[in-house]
Image: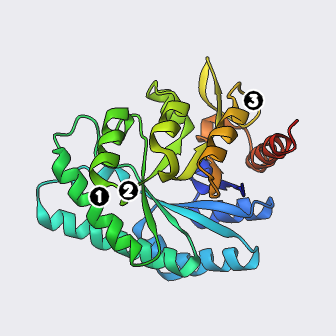
């Protein structure tokens, strides 16, 4: 089982995206998720700078996350076609950039829990986006988010049942904790449709901690991943208040690798 371990630029928010990428690069982080915080970061000088950093430091961009997740309820899954087309056009630009820089996974939050989006519409819009992304070699992956429809195990089961082989998922450990969902149960349900992981540690007092500072059973996680022959990435994603310095993010990635290497050696 191969495993790329990295860090999301989201951890450094609200530092500008290109500066966040640079800070990770300077600390030796090679695998990254880029959290895009403004539509103009997909063009012009910011994109030039992102490409420069990626090339100069030999970085591997695993995934991209859009800032527009809060808009998805109203735009992507809403009942006004012009708004839907508008957001799909924006996401198409993401797919174009991702194809250029070699990023595979596009992280989708989806509609919020309180929305009245019919499941039929949700599945239809997700499928449309999934198929469009596939044209660019990109996979749209539904993330389990505590305040979204995807927080529900039942909803995820429905997505799998209705979309078959045309649905993939991101499993976020802290979001599972916040949803009171056992991440191992979630992994068991999703199986080999998991294509991306957001990892963090945690304990009874805090649902998001740096790797090695909580009590999460990572060895059990690795065992579950082996069952589905997972060969993608684990991306450390923390909130700014959950760590003390940028250096700690690189330490998190290193700690994750040490835990994984020990597991592989049977220690």
Q: Between residues 114 and 233, which one lies in front from this camera angle?
A: 233
Which of discs 2 and 1 lies nearer the camera? The answer is 2
Q: Nearer the viewer, residue 61 or 226?
A: 226
What residue is pinned by disc 3?
213
The image shows residue 22, relative to residue 191, as above or below, that is: below
User: Mark 2 packing: few (<14 Cα in 10 Å), some, or many (20+)?
Assistant: many
Chain-order first, disc 2 or disc 1: 1
Whether 168 is drawn above or below 261: the answer is below
Answer whether labels 3 and 1 touch (C-beta < 8 Å). no
Q: Can residue 72 be seen?
A: no
Specify which label sits upstream in the sequence, 3 or 1. 1
* Residue at numbered disc 2: 167
Disc 1 secondary structure class: helix
Left or right: residue 183 versus residue 164 is right
Q: Position of residue 263 (x, y in %)?
A: 81, 40
Contact flag, marks 2 and 1 (Cβ < 8 Å):
yes
The one nearer the camera, 13 or 255, is 255
- For mark 1, does the 10 Å Cα neighbourhood hold few (<14), some (14 to 19), or many (20 or more) residues? many
- Residue 10 is at least partly visible in this image: yes
What residue is shown at x 65% (from left), y 63% (from top)? 21
* Residue 40 image position (x, y, % from top left): 43, 72
Q: Which residue position holds label 1? A: 126
Residue 262 position, x and y percent, is 85, 41
The residue shown at (23%, 34%) is 114
Q: Are there few (<14), some (14-19), or many (20+) residues within 10 Å of tag 3?
A: few
Residue 267 place in picture, x, y as percent: 88, 35
Q: For the residues marked 2 and 1, what is the alpha-carbon distance in whole angstroms? A: 8 Å
Q: CA distance from mark 2 to mark 3?
A: 33 Å
Quadrant of residue 15 in the image? Answer: bottom right
């Amino acid at each position: 089982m191969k495993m790329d371990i990295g860090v999301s630029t989201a951890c450094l928010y609200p530092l500008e995206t290109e500066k966040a990428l640079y800070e990770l690069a300077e600390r030796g982080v090679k695998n990254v998720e880029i959290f895009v915080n403004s539509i103009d970061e997909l063009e012009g000088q910011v994109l030039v700078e992102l490409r420069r950093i990626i090339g100069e430091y030999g970085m591997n961009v695993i995934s991209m996350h859009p800032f527009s997740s809060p808009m998805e309820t109203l735009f992507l899954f809403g009942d006004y076609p012009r708004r839907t087309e508008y957001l799909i056009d924006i996401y198409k630009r993401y797919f174009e950039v991702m194809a250029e820089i070699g990023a595979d996974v596009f992280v989708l939050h989806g509609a919020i829990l309180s929305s009245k989006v019919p499941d039929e519409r949700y599945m239809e819009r997700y499928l449309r986006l999934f198929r469009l992304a596939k044209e660019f070699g990109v996979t749209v992956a539904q993330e389990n988010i505590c305040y979204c429809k995807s927080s529900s195990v039942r909803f995820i089961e429905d997505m799998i049942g209705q979309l078959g082989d045309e649905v993939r998922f991101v499993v976020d450990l802290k979001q599972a904790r916040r949803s009171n969902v056992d991440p191992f149960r979630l992994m068991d349900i999703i199986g080999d449709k998991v294509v991306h992981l957001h990892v963090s540690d945690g304990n009874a007092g805090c649902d998001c901690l740096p790797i090695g500072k909580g009590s999460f059973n990572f060895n059990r996680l690795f065992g579950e991943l082996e069952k589905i022959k997972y060969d993608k990435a684990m991306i450390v994603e923390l909130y700014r208040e959950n760590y003390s310095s940028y250096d700690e993010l690189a330490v998190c990635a290193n700690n994750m690798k040490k835990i994984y290497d020990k597991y592989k050696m049977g220690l």
